[in-house]
Image (cartoon, rainbow, N blue to C red):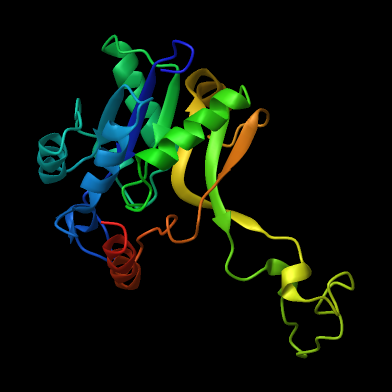
Amino acid sequence: MIDGKKIVAIIPARGGSKRIPRKNIKKLFGRPLIAWSIKAGLESKYIDDVIVSTDDLEIAKISVKYGADVPFIRPDSLSTDFAKSVDVLQHAIDFLNKSGSNYDYLVLLQPTSPLRNAKHIDEAMSLLAKKNADAVIGVCKVHDNPLWSDIIPEDLSISSFLNSDVIGKRSQDVDDYYKVNGAIYICNIDQFIREKTLFIREKNFAYKMTREDSIDIDNNIDFELAKIYLSSVE
């Protein structure tokens, strides 16, 4: 706990997946994909409970096998391609509150981030405490700096393609840009409920991760990359 606060990790994992069928339970280095995030949550020294929100009975069974709690089966209305993560989290929080399980902070762990581990979670939680923050979100450097990019008009003119501030500069002399990596979201639950977003307006800080640890499995290429990265740390 941090200052006596109770923390729940929520792992959303629906059964339907288009690019990689049954993605969340596909074996990655000997264990189902979702098991990597369950393991990370269970090994964190700050997280009290790890909850999986799923509409799929097989995913639920596997999640329990690897140590997570599955206190409910997510309704179909929150398991479509158009369901919002905010609504899935709100449903889980409402269920837990009605069951008498009240928490101060939620940690969203996407099952598609297998390289994110307990060390990352604990460092992000420590940052939360250090900054007296209400939210911390994982980020990583973008591969291609957007300052070297722009749209191309129909006439293909690039006379104003680059900002004058970057013309003539080496890429290493331009400020780094970061993106949300999807691996870790931590948020004060009261603030989340009030603002209906994990990207709350104030007291929200970035936790920097490497691009390798930030891999988000969306297709088979990502899956193969994850195997390569995991082979170097396992």
Q: Quadrant of residue 135?
A: top right
**Residue 196 in sight in this render:** no
Q: Which residue is found at the position 31% from the left and 57% from the top?
A: 233
Q: Is residue 59 left or right of residue 18?
A: left
Quarter of the image for the N terminus: give it: top left
Residue 173 % position (x, y): 78, 68
Q: Is residue 134 left or right of residue 201?
A: left
Residue 155 % position (x, y): 78, 90
* Residue closest to the eye, 195 or 78: 195
Q: Which residue is found at the position 45% from the left and 17% from the top?
A: 104
Q: Quadrant of residue 78?
A: top left
Residue found farthest to the front: 233
Residue found farthest to the right: 164
Quarter of the image for the C terminus: give it: bottom left
Counting the numbered discs, the total is 0
Q: Which residue is found at the position 77% from the left and 76% from the top?
A: 170
Residue 54 % position (x, y): 23, 39
Q: Quadrant of residue 120?
A: top left
Give above or below for 60 relative to 158.
above
